[in-house]
Amino acid sequence: MKQMQIYAFDMNCVSHINHGMWTHPRDTSLLYTDLDYWVDFARTAERGKLDGIFLADIVGVYDIFEGSPAAVIRAGAQIPVNDPLMPISAMAYATKHLGFGVTVNTTYEPPYLLARRLSTLDHLTKGRIGWNIVTGYLDSAARAMGFDTLPEHDARYDAAEEYLEILYKLWEGSWDDDAVRADRTQAIFADPSKVRAVKHDGRYYKMEGVHLSQPSLQRTPLLFQAGASARGQDFAARHAECVFIATPTPQAAKPTVEALKRTAEAIGRGADALRVLGLVTVVVGRTEREAQDKLEDYRRHASVEASLAHYSASTGVDFSKYGLDDPIEQKSTNANQSALAAITKEAPKPVTLREIIDQMVLGSRMKPIVGSAEQVADRLAAWISDGGLDGFNLARTVAPESLRDFVDLVVPVLQERGLFKADYAEGPLRQKLFGGSGRLPFSHPAAAFRH
Ligand SMILES: Cc1cc2nc3c(=O)[nH]c(=O)nc-3n(C[C@H](O)[C@H](O)[C@H](O)COP(=O)(O)O)c2cc1C
């Protein structure tokens, strides 16, 4: 069986996915404003040979539930949330191989500035930066940024296509590989004939400019994407190298994985140009008993209210308006269509609020994988074989012990079984994952913008 990719999934906030875990006496998430917290996290991930740290982010607050952000503010559920890019330099300095997938929303900042920020991080991390491209789904963010309302779902992706075109032009085409001469004797830093302004005049964006950064190791950062509606998948198959999906079971992941790879194949990128990561929560113990005891201990800290408030924002449905046994209606919202589809269209029968709450074991909808290291390894292997996935984003529960437990207990078993690498490959993040030079392959649409 192929080797899996594993990322530690986190966010620059107190409560990320498994809401309420921060109240556990051993949890240290309250230290998220401290660089030591992030450096320790990165070192643990690298000790376990994890492929990277995947940092989620959100612009806006979750205010659909009860029509107010009160529930999430009370619970620290992704609010406050600090900038995810800032801790990366320190984490990169403390590690050598670990990758960083960082979420940045395309809707609220001009591409020109983001191109430089990500190039800067690609330089500072020596080619270990990845970008998770998201387009936003919160009306609260649109209002905060001065828009009357959130742009329409598919139009956000249309705008993102154009956004990426500008970035590709800047990253791939503005500076030639041999533009920088750094010639002290002739006092020529760079050859102006090999540096050019890129131009774009499109439906959503207009710009003209020279990329502010000289070429970095990867030029274009490794491209991640998360967003699994039909339009989102189409976007992912065209641009992404790693796609992040969240499904309750491996079987539910399979059609998405197959569709993504089929499209990547059909457009000439090849199915292997695209790796799909599933979201999992793991509670592991030295024995099954110990893991079950840990689960019961953690469970006492789970916040159903915060989890529902988060889920309301993801789906655009105010769950506070439903009785426990009311089925959730099928409707199309302007929020995260894939999240809603998971409980309505794709569900075998209408789901009730009670059933949703029953799933919220640790303060999220993700049913944790619980057991000894061997049992967890069995389950992860089954996710790969049954779902067709290439790897995982590992959500935290009680931090940092959930990552430490995984690294100390599960990683050695996966390695023994040949399911996870024994050591890192050399080179930039893209090269570690895909081989090649670390630059995007010619089959990727960005290659068309090379000079
Ligand atoms: C697994 C997963 C993770 C996501 N992570 C983020 C995130 O960190 N920040 C964000 O703004 N949106 C995130 N999104 C939202 C998507 O990027 C997208 O805006 C949203 O899902 C709507 O697109 P869709 O209907 O195509 O899924 C995530 C979506 C999924 C499915």
Image (spheres, rainbow, N blue to C red):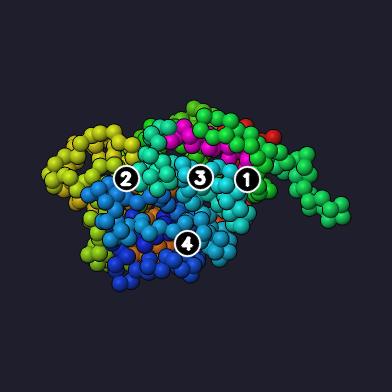
Query: Quick check: 230 left or right of 106?
Result: left
Q: Which residue is mark 2?
A: 314
Labels 2 and 4: the sequence-earlier one? 4
Residue 165 image position (x, y, % from top left): 56, 35
Query: From the viewer's perspective, is residue 165 above or below residue 220?
Result: above
The mark found on residue 219 in the picture is 1
Q: Which residue is mark 4?
A: 45
In the image, what residue type sits under mark 4?
Ala
Residue 7 image position (x, y, % from top left): 45, 54
Q: Real-space Cα distance between discs 3 and 4?
A: 31 Å
Asked if the beta carbon under badge 2 is closer than 8 A to the nearest atom of ligand 1, the reply is yes
Residue neighbourhood size for the residue with mark 4, other residues' Cα within 10 Å, grouped as few (<14), some (14–19), many (≥20): many
Question: Which residues, given as a range, are shown in magenta?
Answer: 156-173
Q: What residue is drawn where x is 46% and y is 53%? A: 54
Residue 358 image position (x, y, % from top left): 19, 51
Labels 3 and 4: the sequence-earlier one? 4
Q: What residue is drawn where x is 13% and y is 47%? A: 324
In the image, what residue type sits under mark 1?
Arg
Q: Real-space Cα distance between discs 2 and 3?
A: 22 Å
